[in-house]
Image (cartoon, grey):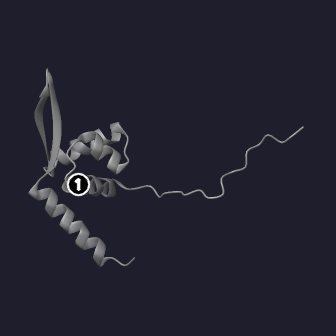
């Protein structure tokens, strides 16, 4: 009888887990680059919807992004997100800090 076991993949990439700050910075960067739709931001940051909602709420509460609702049609509004001046300052600060740290 043949061995029906599958061989493990030869190359497995294991990505290190990101911390909260890294996730927040990535979401801010995506919004700063012009992406305003929530689903696109979520995909760009590679987050689940539940985690993404939590991140958005925290960024809004801290005043780093704003949420705008635009009419999209019959009985529907579309949410769009924009980075605030405070959000831009946070990005500048972390970029400066990461370039100063040794690699």
Where 18 sits versus 94, above or below? above
Where is residue 21, by image quadrant? bottom left
Residue carrying label 1: 28
In the image, taking residue 19 as reference, residue 63 lies left or right, namely left
Residue lying at 59% horizontally and 56% vertically, measured from the top left? 12
The outermost residue toward the right is 1
Q: Position of residue 86 (x, y in %)?
A: 12, 58
Question: Which quadrant holds residue 57?
Answer: top left
> Residue 27, position in %: x, y?
27, 52
Residue drawn where x is 24% and y is 66% of the image: 94
For the point 33% across and 76% down, which residue is it? 101
Q: Secondary structure at mark 1?
A: helix
Q: Give x and y (percent) for residue 17.
A: 44, 55
Quadrant, the C terminus = bottom left
Query: Horizontal placement of 48 versus 35: left or right?
Result: right
Horizontal side, residue 19 vs residue 61: left or right: right
């Amino acid at each position: 009888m043949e061995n029906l076991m599958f061989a493990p993949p030869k190359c497995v990439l294991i990505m290190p887990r990101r911390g909260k700050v890294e996730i927040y910075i990535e979401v801010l960067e995506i919004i700063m680059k012009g992406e305003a739709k929530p689903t696109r931001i979520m995909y760009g940051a590679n987050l689940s919807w539940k985690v993404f909602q939590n991140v958005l709420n925290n960024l809004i509460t801290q005043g780093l992004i704003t949420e705008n609702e635009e009419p999209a049609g019959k009985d529907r509004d579309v949410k769009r997100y924009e980075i605030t001046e405070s959000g831009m300052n946070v990005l500048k600060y972390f970029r400066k800090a990461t370039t100063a740290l040794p690699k």
